[in-house]
Image (spheres, helix red, strand yellow):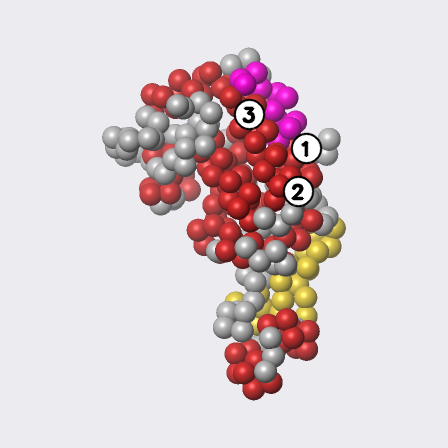
Amino acid sequence: MRRFKGLLFICALALFLAGCSFAGSGGSGTKSVPPDSAILSVSAEPEAAGEPEEPAPSGRPSKEEVLAAREKALEGMSQGQIDRLREVVIAANLKLENGYLNDGLFERLEDPDSLAWNYFDQAGEIQTGWAYDGDLDMEAVCAAENLTEDAFYAKYGRGISETNDYTADDFISLMEELAETVDSEDLKADLQYMADEMERAKSHAAGHVRNIYETLHDLDYFLLRYGPEDFGLYGMDRSTVSLYYGTLSFYG
């Protein structure tokens, strides 16, 4: 099994897909629709925000329930296995969360031909976006020359590429490997569920990526950490880290 350095290939998903009315700004007279490929370096032990816990809304597990479920989930695991599980889940959740909240990731993945799917399909040098001369007004050129988005980039654009080390199959292998290190049948089921959803996502079905994100979110904030208190290290919006999607097998 290859070592997952910096953890996860999937965490490099956030990129801007161009439309004739949507473009990022580049430097040196160039406009681009760039990828966001930064991998987060995450500590497994977040600091508390220092604010009192709010009463848990109906359906959201309380802190006491989370602590009890965590003890049960991690029973029988070595500290090294626990640390690795936490690192993987936290890193993957935070990166997908950034793509979801800041970059419209799931909307872009609704297009099965989106360049975002290259992160799932290919390893090595992959195209992740487009760039074009900053003196061009894309919207005006599209209108004047009756060009589609693809035609504009074919005529005026150049591809932005980067190295992608892992594919959807690697994510599946990682989830299955992690599942082998845990004794809890509930945690095994949740890890296997994400592996199965990634297998389904390989057909470029965006809904399965969203399902993976929601499970990672719940594992992070309502099992391995407790979001309403532990979000302070990352400056997260309380509404995000306090939201429970209801995906985990530990709660009724």
Magenta: predominant secondary structure element?
Answer: helix
Q: Is residue 23 left or right of residue 163?
A: left
Q: Quadrant of the C terminus?
A: top left
Task: Give the distance between the C-alpha atoms of the residues marked 2 and 1, in whole angstroms.
Answer: 9 Å
Q: Residue 174 lies in what quarter of the image?
A: top right
Crowdedness of circle 3 by 10 Å Cα count: few (<14), some, many (20+)?
some
Please name the residue shown 54% across and 69% down the image: 19
Q: Is residue 9 magenta?
A: no
Residue 168's label in the rendered image is: 2
Give the SS element for disc 1: helix
Badge 1 amino acid: Ser
Disc nearer the start of the sequence (2/1):
2
**What residue is rendered at 50% in x and 73% in y?**
21
Mark 3: amino acid: Ala
Q: Secondary structure at mark 3?
A: helix
- Along the line of sight, the residue nearer the viewer: 73 or 161: 73
Could you tell me if the residues under marks 3 and 2 are in contact, i.e. CB atoms within 8 Å?
no
Q: Quadrant of residue 241?
A: top left
Q: Residue at x 50, y 69 (%)?
A: 22
Q: Are marks 2 and 1 in contact (CB under 8 Å)?
A: no
Amino acid of disc 2: Ala
The residue range painted magenta reads: 175-185
Q: Is residue 89 visible?
A: yes
Would residue 137 appear left or right of 53 to someone viewing this image? right
Identify the residue position indicated by label 1 in the image: 173
Q: Is residue 159 above or below residue 99?
A: below
User: In the image, residue 183 lies at what x, y percent?
Assistant: 57, 16
Give the residue pinned by disc 3.
Answer: 189
Which of the 4 image quarters holds residue 52?
top left
